[in-house]
Image: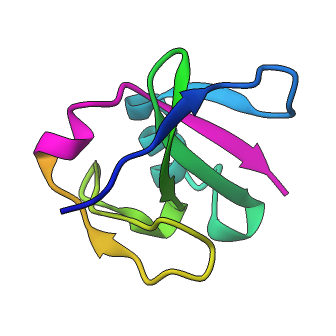
Amino acid sequence: MIKIDLEDIDFEESLTLMKIEDWIKAVEDGIFVNYDGFGFLSTETQESNLMVRPSYVLNHKIIRVSTGFEQTPIKVSSETLNLFTHITWYNR
C-alpha cells in the first residue's frame, strides 16, 4: 500500500497545474520527456507525494509513481489514481 501525503499547492512556486489527461497527451505528443522535469499527482488545490515522470506513462495511463527522486518507481492502482485529477508539473 502506498502512503499518500497531501499538502496545499503553493501557487507562488514555478509550477504548471494540468489535468491528468492533458498531461498524458502532452507526454504522448513528445512535449514532455524525463529530461524536462517531474510532476506530482494532485487535486486542484493539493499536491501529493506521488511523483510522476513522462516515462511512467504507457497506453494512455500512468502506470507507475515514485515517492522521491531516489526511489524506485512502483506500480500504481487505478483506485489510487482515481483520487487525483491533476498533475503539478515542475520544469527543470
Q: Is residue 32 left or right of residue 81?
A: right
Q: Quadrant of the C terminus?
A: bottom right
Q: Is residue 69 above or below residue 52?
A: below
58 part of magenta stretch: no
Q: Position of residue 71 (x, y in %)?
A: 50, 80
Residue shown at the point (20%, 33%) measured from the top left: 82
Q: Is residue 51 left or right of residue 36?
A: left
Q: Position of residue 16 (x, y in %)?
A: 71, 30
Farthest residue, direction top:
44
Given residues 75 and 27, the one toward you in this image is 75
Given residues 4 and 29, the one toward you in this image is 4
Q: Quadrant of the N terminus?
A: bottom left
Magenta residues (range):
79-92
81 part of magenta stretch: yes
Q: Position of residue 12 (x, y in %)?
A: 87, 22
Q: Is residue 10 above or below residue 4?
A: above
Q: Is residue 79 left or right of residue 46?
A: left
Residue shown at the point (44%, 67%) measured from the top left: 66
Residue shown at the point (24%, 58%) measured from the top left: 59
Given residues 76 and 7, the one toward you in this image is 7
Given residues 43 and 91, the one toward you in this image is 43
